[in-house]
């Protein structure tokens, strides 16, 4: 065997040191974490999809006013919103 052949080996020899015992554990923990993050991502994605549909096409209008003129201003806003094309329903909620 020549000197060039001794130094041209490209394989890594793990059995010569103590690090080879930890490599399967590191790979296993990384695979477990990747699986855990995948499950978490799928769960959060499904939750966002489910929750996002319940808030679609809804909006709230807040009317800043004093308590004296609140009913008249609320009626004006409701009448204006009902005239907008595409508005299906207007509902007044009080606190």
Image: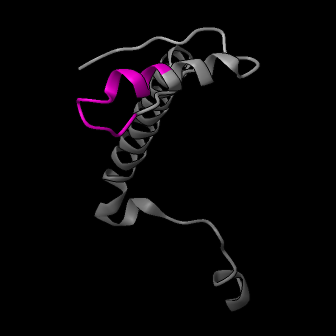
For residue 86, say whether it is visible. Answer: yes
- Picture colour scheme: one colour
Q: Quadrant of the N terminus?
A: bottom right
Q: Nearer the viewer, residue 34 or 57?
A: 57
Query: Within the magenta stretch, is there residue 67?
Result: yes
> In the current view of this chain or complex, which residue is farthest to the bottom?
3
Q: Nearer the viewer, residue 5 or 13?
A: 13
Total marks in image? 0
Quadrant in which residue 80 is drawn: top right
Q: Position of residue 41 (x, y in %)?
A: 48, 32
Quarter-of-image position of residue 6: bottom right
Q: Read off the magenta span.
A: 63-75
Horizontally, residue 11 falls left or right of residue 60, namely: right
Q: Where residue 27 sits: x, y (%)?
A: 43, 46
Image vertical order of residue 61 relative to residue 8, above or below = above
**Closer to the camera, 42 or 36?**
42
Which quadrant of the rendered structure holds the C terminus? top left
Q: Which residue is rendered at x = 42% and y = 29% of the image?
A: 40
Name which residue lies at 40% across and 34% down.
62
Task: Name the quadrant containing residue 83.
Answer: top right
Q: What percent of the width, then of the height, locates residue 93?
A: 35, 14
Q: Is residue 57 visible?
A: no
The outermost residue toward the right is 85
Image height of 45 relative to 27, above or below: above
Give residue 58's position: percent from left, percent from top: 54, 21
- 32 inside magenta stretch: no
From this view, report whether residue 93 is shown above or below residue 17. above
């Amino acid at each position: 065997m020549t000197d060039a052949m001794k130094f041209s080996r490209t394989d890594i020899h793990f059995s010569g040191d103590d690090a080879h015992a930890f490599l399967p554990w590191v790979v296993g923990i990384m695979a477990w974490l990747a699986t855990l993050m995948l499950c978490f991502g799928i769960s959060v994605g499904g939750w966002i999809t489910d929750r996002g549909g319940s808030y679609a096409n809804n909006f709230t209008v807040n009317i800043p006013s004093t308590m004296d003129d609140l009913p008249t201003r609320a009626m004006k806003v409701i009448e204006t919103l009902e005239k907008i094309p595409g508005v299906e329903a207007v509902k007044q909620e009080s606190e």
